[in-house]
Each structure stands twice: as C-alpha cells, then as structure tokens.
Amino acid sequence: MSILVDKNSRVVVQGFTGREGTFHATHMIEYGTNVVAGVTPGKGGTRHLERPVFNTVEAAVTNWSANVSVIFVPAAFAADAILEAASAGIKVIICITEGIPTLDMVKVKHFLKTTESRMIGPNCPGIITPGEAKVGIMPGKIHQKGRIGVVSRSGTLTYEAVHQISNLGMGQSTAVGIGGDPIIGSNFVDIIELFNQDKETEAIVMIGEIGGSAEEEAAVYIKKYVDKPVISFISGQTAPPGRRMGHAGAIISGGKGTASEKIRILKENGIQVVDTPAEIGITVKRILDENG
Amino acid sequence: MKVHEYQAKQIFRDFKVPVPQGAVAEDVDKAIVNAESMGFPCVIKAQVHAGGRGKAGGVRLLHNLEEAGKAAREIIGMKLVSKQTGPLGKQVRKVLIEQALEIKKELYLAIIVDREREMPVIIASTEGGMEIEKVAAKNPELIAKIHVHPVTGFSGFHFRKLVYYLGLTKEQQKNFSGLIKNLYKLFMETDASLVEINPLIITDKDEVVALDGKINFDDNALFKHSHILEMRDLDEEEPLEVEASKYDLNYIRLDGNIGCMVNGAGLAMATMDIIKYYGGEPANFLDVGGGTSEDRVKEAFKILLDDKNVKTVFVNIFGGIVRTDLVARGIVNAIKVMEVNVPIVIRLVGTNEEEGRKIIRESGIDFVLEMSLPEAAQKAVNLSKGA
C-alpha cells in the first residue's frame, strides 16, 4: 500500500507538449509511471512521447480512463487547468506550477470542495510512491521503497530528508510535497490522515516552514488521532519577520507563523522535532529502532 | 509589491473610496505650491515604504507658508528612521501634501486573505490610529473579523455586522456603505494581498474618509495589472535584491557574514538555520532555483560578494533534476573570472555528485569541499570567525 498514487494510477499530463511538460513527463515515463495521455489544447489527435495528445482533460478521461493529472501549464492558465481537471472527474490533481495568484487559488479551492477531487500543490514537487509511480519533478533515484511517509511544504529540503532516509537503509511509502503557497489543495492534516490509515506507513516525517498555521493544526490532529511516530523539522528559524522567504507562503506576518511558535506547539503535542535538517534521517532510525 | 501612500490613494480614488484632497511633490518648491493650493492648515507626509512615519518626524501639520517651506526642506532628503525601516532608515524622495480634516472618530479597516479559512477577511476596529498588532494582543475583543466567501462576495449582512460593531450613526452608515463595497471590490480586482486604512476617520460632517492608505499586491498576480506594476519604486528596494530579481534569483539581505547560496527556498532557509545552530550568522537568503545555469551561478556569486560583510561563502546544492556536475562547472567558471578573497565551502549532493566533486577538486581553486551537512556548516562557521 501507499497513498494517492501507485502502479495502478492512470496519469494524464496537462501542458504535455511544452518544455517543462515534455522534460518531466519523459522522466516520469522512464521511472515507470503509467502515463496514459497528455493534454495540450489545439494539439489533440497528435502523439507525443508515444502517447496520445487530447485537447481536453475530459477526452483523456473518456478515452484512457485517466484518474490522476499532473499540471505543468504556465501560472496564468494553471487555475483554469485545475478547474478543468476537477470538472472532468480526475481524482488526484497535482499542480507543479509556481506563481498562481492567491485570489485565483481562493476561488479554485472553494470550487474543489464541491467536487470529488483531491488536489496537491500548487508550487510543489509532486508525489512519488517509490518503485510504482513518480508524478512530479523529484529525482526518482534518491527514493527507495519503504515504510516512512514523508510530507513537506518544500522541494529540495524534502529531497534532503528522503536522501538521508534512503542512505540509512530505510525507504518511503510515499513522499508528498504539498507546496509552498499560502493557499494549497491539501494541507498537512489531509496527508497525515492518509498516512495514518496506510498500513505500509510505519512513521511519518513532516517538514514544515514559517508562515501560516498548517503545522499547528497538524500538531493538534496528530495528538488526537495518530499513534504512529511523527518526526518533524521546521525551517526558517532565522527568517526575519515581514520578508517572504522564496515561497509565497513562507512569511511571518503580524508576529504569527514563527518557527519557534510552531516548534513549541509541535513539541507540546508529543511530536519529535529535530533541531537541524541534518538530523531528520538519524532521528527516524533511532525512533524506529526504539520501537522495535 | 508595495506602493507609496499617494499611489494607494490614487487607486482608492479610482475605486471611489474617499480620500482627502492631496498632491505629491518631489522638491521643496513644488511642496510649497501644493500647500498653498491646498490651503492651511494642511499636512505634509513623507512617502517611504514603511510605517511609523509620524513618530519619526515624517508627518507634520502646517499652518502657513513658512512652516510649509521649513517642513519640506527638512523632510525631503531626510533619512527617516522608524521601527519598520531598520537602523539605517530610508531616504525620503517624495512628500504628499494633503488637506487637514476635522476628526471626530478614528477607526481601523483592513482586508487580507485568511489562510486558515482560505477566504478574504475584513478586519475592523474602533481603535483606529493605533498599532493594530498591539490592539490585537491587548484587547482582541475590540477587533471584528468578518469573512467574505468568494462565491457570494460582499453582502448586506457583512455590512450590517460592520456598522453595528463600529457603532456608526445613520448618516455615517450611508457614507460608509459605498466605501466598504468599493474597498472589497478594489481588493479582489487588483489582486491585493493587503488593503489597510489606519486611521479611517469620521469627520465633523460625518463623512467617512481614508486618512491613510496602504496596499500590498500579490507579486504573482502583477502580470494581470500592468498599471500597478508601473508604480513599482525601485528606490525603495534593497539594490542587491533588485539586481538579483533580474536574474530570477531570490535574494534577501541579512546582517550576518556567511554568504549562502542554495537551491530551493526550504533548503535555503534550513541552511541558514543550521549556520545559526553552530553559532554563525547568515549574511543572506539566496535561492538560485531549480534550473541552476552557469550564468545564474555567476550572478549569484557577484551578488553575494558585493556584500562587504561576507567573510565566507557556503554553497549547499542538492541536485535533483539539476545535475551537480553542471553546477560545479558553473561555480568553477564563475570563480575563475572573479576576484574572490574569502573561503568558499561547497556541499554538492545528488545527481552526478561524483562527477561534480571531481570538477571542484581538479579546478585548481582552493575550495573547501565537504559532503556532510553538519560538517560543512561548522566549517563555514569556523572560517567566518577567522579560525
């Protein structure tokens, strides 16, 4: 088992024939992901990377039963692409695109609540279930099949954690990058709920950062519902208030969303918080060894 | 993106949000002309992207031409130092001259996006003119938060909640009704991330007027609003940050002495954190992004080394999709054409890392190559202290 994507996922790539779409779809196919089709408006009926191209997501769903979509279209059109995927009945929508306006996402998010779709991102590396499906831009090689669920707001910092976990002989059940924007499709709580139900996931790594209150909400949820060990790191302990640290969502405003406050609340709720990013892997190992 | 008060007020006027009459000036003569045409008493306000201008001497009431000249001479060109500018302050290049109004009551009004509820929220308080964070900490009951669902938009009951809370009279309600509807419209249509009026005043004639005005815009949405993008004032931004943004580098200057170059925002923050953990001080946040080309690495080094406080550089690259051998080549080529007098600690991990390290080792340049994150961070910290 795993969460969200596996070898049975039927993936459609939105923005398939563009530069980003082509590059990452190639890597996804090489990894063994079941990419069934692509969508580029105006190019329907052609073929690309040995897969059919459709004008609409709906056609990819009708003809190839696509149930997972990954979006590489430019920011100005990405909100529309999400709405299209959800309207076509796609179950898991993964939006890689960075730079979608916040108020566009506000409307998209409230629309999604009226559908069956679950969305990951935007501005995220995607989801990987090692050995089964890579739906996103993460390097496949550093991942290894295993029993640690990884969920994170960041990209390269997630790779860092995954790398440490793999190097210590452990692996990941699934690794999910939820994205660095203020409004995102799925929050920590949504993903941790899935990891908690997944029999293959033994421990959960949650990598948070400054801004918002998703980590605090997760802490309360974990204390209430999760028996599996949760190991966490929060980046941005040295970030100055009022400055956006790369991610649109990583900003301390009005004294809220500081790393120290998040760490305090996580610890209060029984979560193991590591001081530096270098300790994520060894801490997971120690806790699993202790638990036998 | 931030704009000046006078620009925010122009946008307010465009959306029919009442503001005092006013005109901007860049020199003393124009300021005096403005004051004369406004009539006395009037107000002069320094235009910088920072709050706390009043306490810093950047806002004054003028009663006659003589005072207008004196104030304009003192304020234009001054280094305004407030809590929000940092100790170096900000140079004042423009002033806004505005009519002075009789104030009966000062209120607070703002709109932001509430990330938890994922919708816009109107924040109102009867305690106008004060720092709203202080009010929130001390008397949270004096602040009303009214969420507006994006599907319905601003509705009658939102308005009623606001006016009952603020205790407005019938006449004041009539004047407030257009203002709040238009302000919400402005927030949505310009893709603002913050609209704040502090204070929103009720005049002796029961008019409701935005005495101050602040708007921040969502950087990601500026492609839709070219007329707003034109208002960007590069003089208000840190020059190195402006330079970095030209190359799609995400750079934020800090006070320390270890220059950091990292790919990815999360890892960049985490790198700063580990430096601090081992007793060092990061000089900056710098995310060189995913497609780390040689040109970008070169520019990144230029910007890092332009900060004269930097005593050591720490490069931390996790090669995912980007190949570390390409990054290594970029670093070597950048250093070859630059004069670098500080030690450089490099950590390269990920795709093609063996090849990348080989390039660094065989470059003939004296890099400190270290693969373990804590070891690399400690070395950078020690070098920054001259050890």
Image: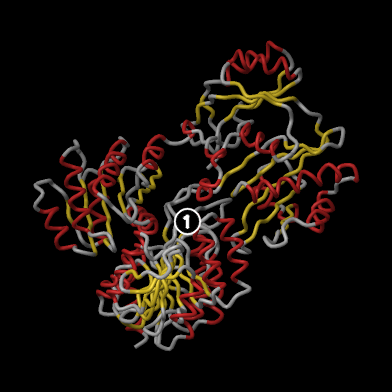
Q: Nearer the viewer, residue A185 or A264?
A: A185
Could you tell me which residue is drawn at 49 percent across and 54 percent down? A248
Q: Position of residue B293 (x, y in %)?
A: 26, 50
Task: Answer whether residue A276 is visible to the viewer in this image.
Answer: no
- Vertical position of residue B363 compared to residue A262: above or below: above
- Vertical position of residue A265 compared to residue B278: above or below: below
- Vertical position of residue B92 compared to residue B199: above or below: above
Farthest residue toward the front?
Answer: A45
Task: Answer whether residue A265 is visible to the viewer in this image.
Answer: yes
Q: Position of residue A251 (x, y in %)?
A: 50, 53
Q: Position of residue A283 (x, y in %)?
A: 34, 74
Could you tell me which residue is drawn at 34 percent across and 88 percent down? A292
Q: Nearer the viewer, residue B41 or A289?
A: B41
Residue carrying label 1: A75
Amino acid marked by disc 1 = Ala
- Left or right of A116 on screen, residue B144: right
Q: Nearer the viewer, residue A139 or B67?
A: A139
Q: Secondary structure at mark 1?
A: helix
Chain of the residue on which disc 1 is drawn = A
- In the rendered image, which quarter is residue A286 located in? bottom left
Is the image coloured rainbow, by chain, by secondary structure, or in one colour?
A: secondary structure
Farthest residue toward the right?
Answer: B170
- Vertical position of residue B66 compared to residue A58: above or below: above
- In the rendered image, which quarter is residue B47 located in? top right
**Badge 1 local density, few (<14 within 10 Å), some, or many (20+)?**
many
Q: How many marks?
A: 1
Could you tell me which residue is drawn at 53 percent across and 49 percent down? B221
Q: Nearer the viewer, residue B15 or B378?
A: B15
Q: Position of residue B60 (x, y in %)?
A: 67, 24
